[in-house]
Image (cartoon, rainbow, N blue to C red):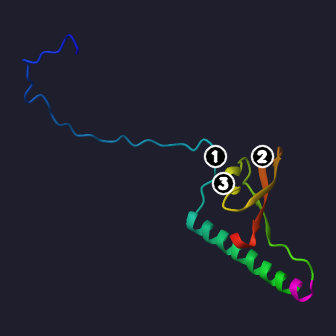
Amino acid sequence: MNKNFKPHLFLKNSHKTQQFKIIPRAIKDKRGIPKKERIEHGNYLLAELNSLWKNYNNELNVRTQQRLPIKEGEYVTFKSSENNTLNIKSLDSDGAKLLNVKHNPETKQDTATLFIPKNKS
């Protein structure tokens, strides 16, 4: 036990309330990612993916009718905006296979190619 412990002393009414206010401060994004309209961008990406799978199904039907070999998925390429990198770990997940990553030193952009199996579409 602490040598300064005084069991015979009791403190009463030793507290007081104070107003607390958070001081707003600007948080700067260190990576410099350009601001985008998230809902608009999400809808754009969803439409692009839907178009990709529609084209895949059309190609699959044509190749099946012609008895040609078919691939069981689709290749997708992602490209970062200038002076930014892609989050590679997030791309290589949920069944998608990361095949290739290239970095362009002039534009400071990343380009990644993935293969998404048909059962993960």
Which residue, given by chain and number where applicable, does mark 2 sit on? 108
Which residue, given by chain and number where applicable, does mark 3 sit on? 90
Q: Nearer the viewer, mark 3 or mark 2?
A: 3
> Can residue 121 be seen here?
no
Which residue type does callout 2 highlight? Lys
Q: Residue furthest front?
A: 1
Q: Residue furthest bottom?
A: 65
Identify whether 76 is placed above or below 108.
Answer: below
Local secondary structure at mark 1: loop
Local secondary structure at mark 2: loop
Local secondary structure at mark 3: helix
Q: Report the side of 29 relative to 88 (left or right).
A: left
Residue 76 belongs to magenta span: no
Which residue, given by chain and number where applicable, does mark 1 sit on? 32
The picture places residue 100, in percent across and down from the top left corner, at: 82, 54
Tell me the residue at 78%/46% (across/down): 108
Are there few (<14), some (14-19), or many (20+) residues within 10 Å of tag 3? Answer: few
Q: Quadrant of residue 9?
A: top left
Mark 3 or mark 2: name the one nearer the start of the chain: 3
Query: Which one is in front, 94 or 1?
Result: 1
Q: Report the side of 37 relative to 54 (left or right).
A: left
Name the magenta segment's main secondary structure. helix
Query: Which one is in front, 80 or 49?
Result: 49
Mark 2 or mark 1: name the one nearer the start of the chain: 1
Mark 1 or mark 3: name the one nearer the start of the chain: 1
Look at the image and tell me in which quarter the C terminus lies.
Answer: bottom right
Tell me the residue at 92%/85% (across/down): 67
Magenta residues, start to end: 63-67
Q: CA distance from mark 1 to mark 3?
A: 19 Å
Are there few (<14), some (14-19), or many (20+) residues within 10 Å of tag 1? Answer: few
